Amino acid sequence: MKVEISRRRFLQGSVAMSVVGGVSLSTSSMIASAGAPAKKIGNDTKKVATLCEMCVNKCAAIAHVRNGVIEKLDPNPLFPKSRNMLCARGNSGIQALYDPDRLKYPLIRDGEKGSGKFKRATWDEAYAYINEKLTKILDEEKDNRSTVAFCAGEGMAEHTFKTFFTLFGSSHFLNHASLCLATTVSGYSLTIGGYGQADLDNAKYVIMAGANRAEAIVTPDTMDFFKRTNGRGAKLVCVDPRFTNTAAKSDKWLAINVGTDLAFVLALTYVAIKEERYNKAFVENYFNGFETYKEHILSNQYTPEWAEKITGIKAKEIYEVAREFMAAAPQAVYYQGRRTTWSKNDFQLRRAMALFSALGGGVDVKGGICFGKSLPLVEHEVPAPMYAQAKPRIESKEAAVVGGSGSWVAFRNMVLEGRSPYPIRALFNYKHNPMHNMPNAKKTEEFLKKLDLVVTIDTMPSDTVMLSDVILPECHYLERTDPVVSYGGIEPSIAQRNKVVEPMFESKPVMEIMRGLSAKISKPLFEITKKYDEDVQEAIEDDDEETVYAEFDLTKAFAHDQEELNVHAVEKYEGAAEILKEKGVFYPNMNEYFKKTGVNDYEYYPEHKRAYSVRNLKFNTPSGKIECVLDSLTKKGIDAMPTWKKEYEMAIPEGKFRFITGRHAQFTQSGTANNRLLLNLVPENYAWINKRVASKMGIKFGDKLEVSSPVGKTTIKAYPTEKIGPDTLFFVHGFGVSSSAMHLAHNNGGNDAKILEDGIEPMHGSSCLHDTIVAIRKV
Amino acid sequence: MARYGMALNYKNCINCRACESACKEENGVLLLPDHYRIWVGVKEAEGEYPNISIASQTYHPSQCQHCENAPCQLVCPTNATHYSPEGMVMVDPTRCILCTYCINACPYDARYVDQRTMTVDKCTFCSDTRLANGETTTACQATCPTKVRVFGDLDDPNSEISQLLAKHEYRQVKEHLGTKPKLFYIL
């Protein structure tokens, strides 16, 4: 009887997973050299259609190979999302592949944690070491699988690693979401029923606040939009404390005080409502709770005059932007933004932005925020076992809604401060660099040192890798075939990363690493489950051990070959598998629809086949309408409507600065810090400081500054400029690597993770990266 | 015979520098300081925070202008710098003696010394790396996210570049020097 229950419990855990796989290991004879690969020698050439992974966009590329060496990456025009382009980082993928500092062999720590001392190991030795540590930990923790945490960086192979996590049975998966986009995705989703895609190919009026699409490239937004700015169809209002490259392409740049965007949006909303400029028919039919929101905005007197005092933006500008936006609506977008870990009000800010956009009717319509269509794939299903002893996520109470990707900062701090209800003892890390991507690096270092086992899979010896116990070298993205991916949108398509060259040294794709590791640990870990899990003991009594083990067999998800799984995933589309292998991109009727329309230009879908409007005015929210009031959140301490609070106003003491961080178009977070080509373009980062303030302080261009906060300090050169306000300091993220194994990145520039304080916002426990006050000193 | 030139929708430029990186990878330009065949000229913003003149900050993608009256060609004592049949200004490294007269003569600062060959190097419109292989675009054009560049035959009235130049106003850089540059900036 109980067997039935536990069986049902097993089956509940069935998860859909497509699995990365099956590239046989081969140590290439080619050696990574410091120079560019030799050019044009030999005639054994081929072209392979693949996908970039130098950032999150996954642009389609054609790799040119000569005698086994990749000589050049060109854009592949077939992919609607990447629109026939490769940016600077895309072009530099070859340098990442042939970086002499790449991780080449499995390594096991051979000295104090953080000493940087490792000994070379075979794959089997590395797996055996992990097995020994893991079985000890899980035995001591009585099979509480949640004592082992998993974290992953974004990437197509993240999925495979997550499969391993799911089968392993821990509650703790952590990724970039709480350090990046959680608040904007949920803010828009809970309000208009989806994060959507801003149709920047057709919008007539766009407010980009904080989002910097000229530097933080997002496809196809960046490419679509900047062909239309500067009086060529789209008006751009850029709201940013810095004069960015996006500001330089704008019609209006509004310099805003850091962390006050919510006041700006509330005032825009006030003007739209008070002057009755919103789309009345749309609001009447498709808004839920509008009267309450209207009353809230008006009674709180969120006037432009009120907002001017908080934001520093003139009231007259706010009136003008609100009126122009509503006049252009519904082809008007308050751009959603992506990395929205700024301040405590991030979630409410994104809600207010979504509501303001929707007041103009610019949702699910051409030129507004579109939801698009997707091309479903056939999922490969593997049942996941359930572990009776696995305890729930430790940081679930640290914010109102802690989702499946956790609150990284809350998790780390609970472990560090001894507030965890049970010990966290180990961490499996796939291509994630918490030492750089999380605020307060000193705490991250202590956290990593506190763990009994840190296993990191990566391609480069990052600061996090150096604090690991076992290092498993993943092959580069051009050395592996990854799971085929479907990209929904206005012009949906399916794309596939195809292996271009064989993996170098002893590196392997994640699929193969998981296959080897699971083969080693699966049985020993099952023995521990058997020892502590009564359900399992009873199941074995009723059934036989072999049958029960089959459910707990970690190896089963990694048995298939990736190419084979990809063929299966697209089997409902005739001919797709071959086309994806040959051309890297597929969508139904591609042969008919895809047209070259100029030397640079392509058409992917005819106008009437583009998925601008798909919801038929039924939004994907509980009421099917645009949600003004989220009452359900109030019992979790979250305001039902976006509300300005006095505590959002942060005083900046005389002589100090509020620190902000961000991106430029040549680096992807900390992942490109050692790339020769990109460093050739941008040798180091500089701290932006207001020119007049710098002059008063005797700081000139290139002077070395020590930037310090209550949590740490970093050293960086000064760039005095009028493009930033007198009380703000900025530098781009991704420099200042400590790892001496990354020879070009080591100690090059300033590291923001060392100075950022680690506050979190109340909705998802996302980081507040713009809430740190810093001091500077010439050194 | 074609006569190659390039039109630039320079207002599209976001200074992402994809063009520079593609040029370096395509043409094997050494990854050293001051080694570049193409670049984006940035004019820094004028004004005082928060009153910045938006129009004052410009991005100006540039490279060898492949002048019809090229000063670099006039001063070259060994004829290393010469015109290709398609009107492109080329350097024959086997003839270059590194006198650097051409570097001084070029009003566009489009030439540099390649530390590997110790000869002068510059943009070739990818003639050896791409055009010779049947490609019809340069690396900088092909890779550009916002599609700034249009390369093509100025003598073919049906080419996209000819059509663009017929339809749009454009300007050339330092035209008054009489160099007859073949880069056209679409206004």
Image (tube, coloured by chain):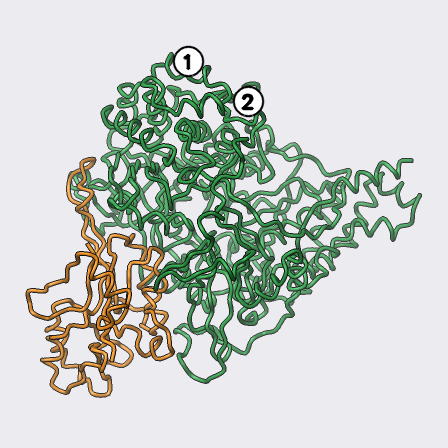
* Looking at the image, residue A30 lies above or below residue A55: below
Q: Secondary structure at mark 2?
A: helix
* Looking at the image, residue A11 lies above or below residue B165: above
Residue located at (29% from left, 58% from top): B148
The spot of residue A19 in percent (x, y) is 66, 56
Circle on res. A633: 2
Is residue A580 toward the left or the right of residue A230 in the image? Answer: right
The spot of residue A313 in percent (x, y) is 25, 28
* Looking at the image, residue A68 lies above or below residue A190: below
Image hue for chain A? green
The spot of residue A300 in percent (x, y) is 37, 14
Q: Specify whether residue A345 is in view.
A: no
Depth check: B68 or A776 in front? B68
- In the picture, the quarter occupied by the N terminus of chain A is top right
Q: Are marks 1 and 2 in contact (CB under 8 Å)?
A: no
Q: Chain of mark 2?
A: A
* Residue denoted by label 1: A295
Q: Secondary structure at mark 1?
A: helix
Q: CA distance from mark 1 to mark 2?
A: 19 Å
Tell me, by letter, which chain the rendering colours orange.
B
Residue located at (58% from left, 47% from top): A151
The spot of residue A525 in percent (x, y) is 76, 50
* Residue A175 placement: quadrant: top right
Q: Chain of mark 1?
A: A
Is residue A531 toward the left or the right of residue A681 in the image? Answer: right
Residue located at (39% from left, 58% from top): A745
